[in-house]
Image (cartoon, rainbow, N blue to C red):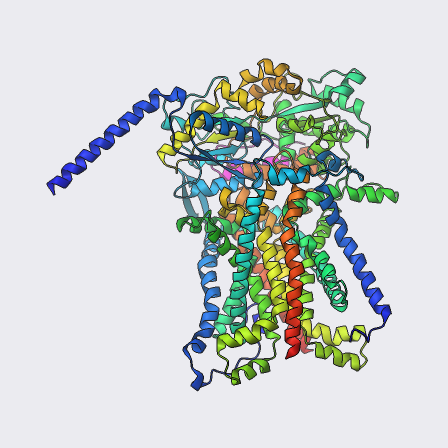
């Protein structure tokens, strides 16, 4: 059984511990290595995840300061089909995640490749390219909202200089989602950049030298050496970036609140509203569970497709 | 063995005597606030928080009692309170609850009725009851003055009409009392993009366009439910009055408002006012402090306040967005008493005067009617004092959180022209009715508007 | 190899990087500049302004401000949780990649961690609050550190798997044959070779812990609150204190910038260690 590409990660096994060497420490080392992760996950994630699943089959109401759990079977899951916010959210989130992550991966990759090829000022470039991710989400939301402002924003001032009419970037239905995506690209490209750069830096240097001696150009080197070697790093970066993009919340919460209309409604924002604001924990949990399975399915399918492509 | 029993009985008798003594002392010495155990108040950071902090310090100094403040971002205050009241043992002894989420605390049975802690406590008559939201009847589940006292108002907050007094003088305009007059005045000053006649808060947010529209809605005689206080939750948002209110709201935006009213949240409305680009705005009193601060405003001394207008035959209806102090059930009795002792001190005239001086609007009407109101810096007091008793609550049930999600979307769609006002209100009525019905209330709805 | 390259491509590379750096920097500089403006100067979008330090004074030194205290808390939570995450993740990654556990455990652990990563934090803070309160870890640094370790472990675990996987198995076999014990092998062979990965995972873990808001808010109180909780207080119900917020954000970026500049040295060290092989 493979779970979400995890088999791509395990490589050759070490030879079994030679019998003569069976020191206690050696024999128990793998267990010692794995125990902290396993314990942490068992203790701190089992309950929240189990709780989430159980809640999704219940209605939870509070009376006299006590919770009452009423089983509702699959009703919450059935109701999702008719939830206008959830439906709009899925569409927008898919567009958002696809566009934003694709651009971030491309930009991050090329910035990383370029940065890895310079020797002077690499520290400076690297620090600059990481800066946006250092700004807390709430500040990014508030500040970009000012920059996008119709009456006073720096962006409208700038396009006014070249004689264009001001646009309401966040209040215009046709622009709002794109505007949020731009902010997300600015905010999250550093994530891709940083990881891909680390991947590049840990590649064995002798391969490059051999390629250069063979007279390979930049693009050949990219296609035949960098990309194949970088594939695991790219895959993990993409995987995590995609998951975080599906959880996008801060930017939407502060920039648009899901509006105008439902043009920037995203799944995690609907979950926040149903689960927390409206205090419908059962229904909100069902939303989370469906999103989780949808995302997992997407990743498994993508992985299958990738494997097929590699074979042909 | 028998020795032990005697010991226990003696101990019990002693404990009883101590309890009786403290009870006698407790009731007898309330005037000068007896020694209390330390307690914790959970509150959100807000423009009026600094005033609250200073008054808490004064209380500590005067009484020697210890008060801890757990100050949270606005966005996190409900989360923290919900966590605490749902735990077996609460963290917080006094909850400062927002007008949008206090209902959840009442209905969920998380609060102790104040007179269960001290039967003799009374809300000072100089403090308005904010559309009776300080009371709760657990049987009918309504905010009725026949119910029990659950909380004490901590911060009064209602929207008032902010207008440019300097421009009014220049153009010889009269402060509007009807919606028609407001439209005429806004049009007279409308000169985009330098000056907008009015800036409305038409965005879809947590509670943006809904809170902005409600003074119009109630001021046109519209009601969300047929008779909420009597327990009749027939949805009447799509009444002819509702339609008139929404059509007016959209028209005002179109003819004298911001070109992108559908994208204006509260921060943008305030930004337009303080930068001198808005001739009018219906804004909460809590935003007033920024108006006369030169580091925050380009219109220092130029703004003034009036009651929101109303349609002929109806009263102005500022929508309350206040904060209430309530005491949870899941904290020890002595800490509940400490919390109540603070509120008892807080509601006195003297404390409220200090509260006002420290920069927070008071909850007592007589403070707003005092000589303090004559100072130019306090020119907001008159409108505030008139407006508070007229304050209306949007809704009083926990399902409000679901209602607001509906109205934010539909009203915003009406403002942006995605839907007609009638269609938006019909959609609101249908969806709100579903929520209310599911909640088990007595309900119904009006025929669709055409 | 550096000398082999002609000048042309290097200039083009720098040119492209400088343009990219400008695009990244302009919004950042704009945010940074806001920290030196008055609120009204910022709101009117004035291009020229008289710089003021009032915002920093407000953030750092007024009576209600607990910023320095929050900053210290964040430093503790950030460094301790990052150190533990890196240790736990690298240890586990090595065991997983070299298949020193049953297959179901390998895939189960990696799959479970990613599923956990997909859950919206808002649905998690409730159960966590209850758990931590039951064992008395709410409002403690330990609780917050534990929570941040768990939140950041999935990413670090997967990343370290990738980096450990890159290490040629022959190196480990050679050490094995030379008689190294398992811990020695891990410390002397694995750790030096995964340095670039550790640096990247470490910086990201630190940043995520440093900026994490939802869990920090719910598990902390006054004494244990972190920087994002402090900064969020500037987004108030009726007034967003943009300029103070910008000042707070600018100050909060300092540790990570320092870490980035220092981290670079470690990466270089890691590379040379790798080259020696």
Where B161 falls versus A266 (above or below)? above
Report the side of B231 relative to C39 (left or right).
Answer: left
Where B428 falls versus C105 (above or below)? above
Report the side of A6 relative to B230 (left or right).
Answer: right
Magenta stretch holds residue B438: yes
Compare residues A32 and C191 and report the one nearer the observer. C191
Compare residues B194 and B29 and report the one nearer the observer. B29
Tell me residue C51's x, y (percent): 75, 39
Tell me residue B319's x, y (percent): 59, 27
Work out which quarter of the rendered image holds the C terminus of chain A and state it. bottom right
Report the side of A190 relative to B206 (left or right).
Answer: right
Tell me residue B400's x, y (percent): 54, 35
| Residue drawn at the location 68% of the way across and 71% of the way down | A230
Q: In the rendered image, is residue A305 in sight?
A: no
The quadrant in which residue A307 appears is bottom right
Report the side of B399 relative to B222 (left or right).
Answer: left
* Residue numbers of the magenta segment: B426-450
Tell me residue B223's x, y (percent): 58, 26
| Residue drawn at the location 39% of the way across and 42% of the way down | B89
Q: Residue furthest left?
A: B2
Compare residues B407 and A191 and report the one nearer the observer. A191
Where A111 falls versus B353 (above or below)? below
Q: In the rendered image, is residue C41 in sight?
A: yes
| Residue drawn at the location 42% of the way across and 30% of the way down | B65
The quadrant in which residue C238 appears is top right
The quadrant in which residue C193 appears is bottom right
- Count up the numbered dots: 0
């Amino acid at each position: 059984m493979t779970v979400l590409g995890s088999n791509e990660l395990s490589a050759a096994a070490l030879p079994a511990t030679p019998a003569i060497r069976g020191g206690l420490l050696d024999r128990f080392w793998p267990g010692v290595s794995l125990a902290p992760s396993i314990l942490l996950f068992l203790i701190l994630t089992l309950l929240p995840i189990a709780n989430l699943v159980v809640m999704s089959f219940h209605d939870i109401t509070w009376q006299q300061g006590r919770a009452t759990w009423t089983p509702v079977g699959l009703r919450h899951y059935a109701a999702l089909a008719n939830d206008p916010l959830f439906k709009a959210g899925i569409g927008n989130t898919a567009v958002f995640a696809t566009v934003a992550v694709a651009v971030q991966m491309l930009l991050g990759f090329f910035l990383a490749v370029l940065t890895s090829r310079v020797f002077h000022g690499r520290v400076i470039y690297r620090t600059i390219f990481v800066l946006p991710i250092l700004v807390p989400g709430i500040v990014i939301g508030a500040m970009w909202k000012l920059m996008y402002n119709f009456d006073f924003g720096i962006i409208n001032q700038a396009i006014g200089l070249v004689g264009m009419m001001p646009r309401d970037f966040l209040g215009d239905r046709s622009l709002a989602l794109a505007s949020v995506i731009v902010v997300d690209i600015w905010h999250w490209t550093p994530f891709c950049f940083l990881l891909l750069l680390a991947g590049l830096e840990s590649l064995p240097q002798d391969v490059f030298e051999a390629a250069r001696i063979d007279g390979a150009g930049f693009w050949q080197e990219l296609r035949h050496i960098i990309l194949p070697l970088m594939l695991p790093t790219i895959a993990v970066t993409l995987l995590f970036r995609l998951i975080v993009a599906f959880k996008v919340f801060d930017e939407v919460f502060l920039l648009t609140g899901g509006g105008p209309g439902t043009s920037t409604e995203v799944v995690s924002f609907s979950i926040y509203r149903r689960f927390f604001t409206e205090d419908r924990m059962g229904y909100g949990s069902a939303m989370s569970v469906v999103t989780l399975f949808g995302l997992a399915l997407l990743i498994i399918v993508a992985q299958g497709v990738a494997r097929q492509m590699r074979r042909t | 063995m028998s020795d032990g029993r005697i010991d226990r009985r003696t101990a019990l008798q002693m404990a009883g005597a101590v309890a009786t003594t403290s009870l006698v002392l407790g009731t007898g010495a309330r005037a000068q606030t007896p020694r209390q155990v330390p307690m914790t108040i959970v509150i959100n950071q807000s423009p009026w928080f600094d005033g609250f902090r200073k008054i808490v310090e004064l209380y500590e100094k005067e009484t020697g009692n210890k008060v801890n403040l757990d100050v949270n971002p606005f966005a996190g205050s409900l989360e923290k309170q919900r966590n605490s009241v749902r735990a077996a043992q609460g963290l917080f002894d006094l909850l400062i609850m927002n007008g949008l989420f206090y209902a959840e605390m009442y209905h969920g049975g998380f609060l102790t009725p104040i007179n269960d802690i001290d039967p003799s406590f009374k809300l000072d008559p100089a403090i308005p009851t904010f559309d009776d939201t300080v009371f709760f009847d657990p049987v009918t589940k309504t905010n009725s003055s026949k119910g029990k006292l659950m909380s004490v108002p901590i911060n009064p907050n209602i929207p008032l009409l902010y207008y440019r007094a300097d421009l009014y003088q220049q153009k010889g305009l009269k402060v509007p009392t009807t919606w028609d007059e407001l439209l005429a005045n806004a049009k007279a000053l409308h000169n985009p993009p330098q000056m907008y006649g009015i800036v409305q808060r038409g965005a879809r947010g947590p509670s943006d366009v809904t809170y902005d529209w409600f003074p119009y809605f109630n001021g046109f005689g519209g009601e969300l439910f047929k008779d909420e206080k009597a327990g009749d939750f027939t949805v009447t948002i799509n009444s002819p009055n509702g339609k008139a209110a929404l059509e007016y709201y959209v028209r005002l935006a179109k003819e004298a408002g911001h070109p992108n009213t559908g994208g204006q949240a509260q921060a943008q409305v305030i930004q337009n006012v303080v930068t001198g680009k808005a001739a009018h705005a219906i804004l909460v009193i809590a935003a007033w402090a920024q108006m006369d601060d030169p580091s925050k405003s380009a219109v220092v001394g130029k703004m003034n306040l009036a009651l929101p207008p109303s349609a002929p035959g109806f009263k102005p209806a500022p929508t309350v967005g206040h904060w209430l102090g309530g005491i949870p059930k899941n904290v020890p009795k002595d800490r509940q008493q400490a919390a109540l002792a603070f509120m008892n001190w807080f509601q006195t005239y003297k404390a409220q005067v200090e509260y006002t001086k420290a920069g927070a609007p008071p909850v007592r009407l007589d403070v707003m009617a005092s000589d303090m109101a004559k100072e130019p810096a306090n020119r907001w007091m008159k409108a505030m004092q008139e407006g508070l008793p007229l304050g209306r609550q949007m809704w009083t049930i926990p399902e409000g959180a679901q209602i607001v999600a509906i109205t934010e979307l539909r009203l915003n769609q009406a403002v942006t022209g995605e839907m007609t006002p009638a269609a938006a209100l019909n959609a609101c009525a249908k969806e709100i009715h579903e929520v209310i019905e599911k909640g088990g209330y007595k309900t119904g709805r009006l025929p669709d508007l055409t | 190899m550096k000398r082999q390259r002609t000048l042309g491509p290097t200039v083009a590379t720098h040119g492209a990087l400088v343009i990219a750096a400008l695009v990244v920097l302009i919004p950042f500089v704009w945010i940074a500049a806001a920290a030196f403006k008055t609120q009204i100067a910022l709101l009117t979008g004035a291009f020229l302004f008289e710089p003021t330090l009032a915002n920093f004074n407000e953030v750092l030194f007024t009576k209600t401000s607990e910023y320095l205290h929050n900053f210290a808390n964040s430093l503790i939570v950030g460094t301790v949780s990052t150190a533990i995450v890196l240790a736990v993740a690298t240890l586990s990654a090595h065991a997983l990649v070299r298949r020193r556990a049953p297959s179901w455990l390998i895939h189960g652990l990696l799959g479970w961690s990613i599923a956990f990563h997909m859950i919206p934090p808002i649905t998690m803070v409730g159960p966590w609050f209850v758990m931590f309160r039951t064992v008395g870890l709410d409002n403690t640094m330990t609780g917050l550190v534990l929570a941040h370790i768990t939140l950041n472990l999935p990413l670090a675990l997967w990343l370290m798997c990738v980096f450990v996987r890159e290490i040629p198995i022959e190196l480990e076999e050679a050490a094995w044959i030379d008689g190294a014990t398992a811990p020695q092998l891990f410390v002397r062979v694995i750790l030096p070779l995964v340095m670039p990965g550790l640096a990247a995972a470490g910086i990201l873990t630190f940043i995520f812990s440093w900026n994490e808001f939802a869990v920090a808010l719910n598990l902390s109180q006054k004494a244990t609150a972190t920087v994002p909780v402090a900064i969020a207080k500037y987004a108030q119900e009726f007034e967003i204190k943009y300029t103070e917020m910008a000042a707070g954000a600018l100050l909060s970026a300092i540790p990570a910038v320092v870490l980035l500049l220092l981290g670079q040295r470690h990466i270089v060290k890691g590379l040379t260690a790798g080259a020696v092989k």
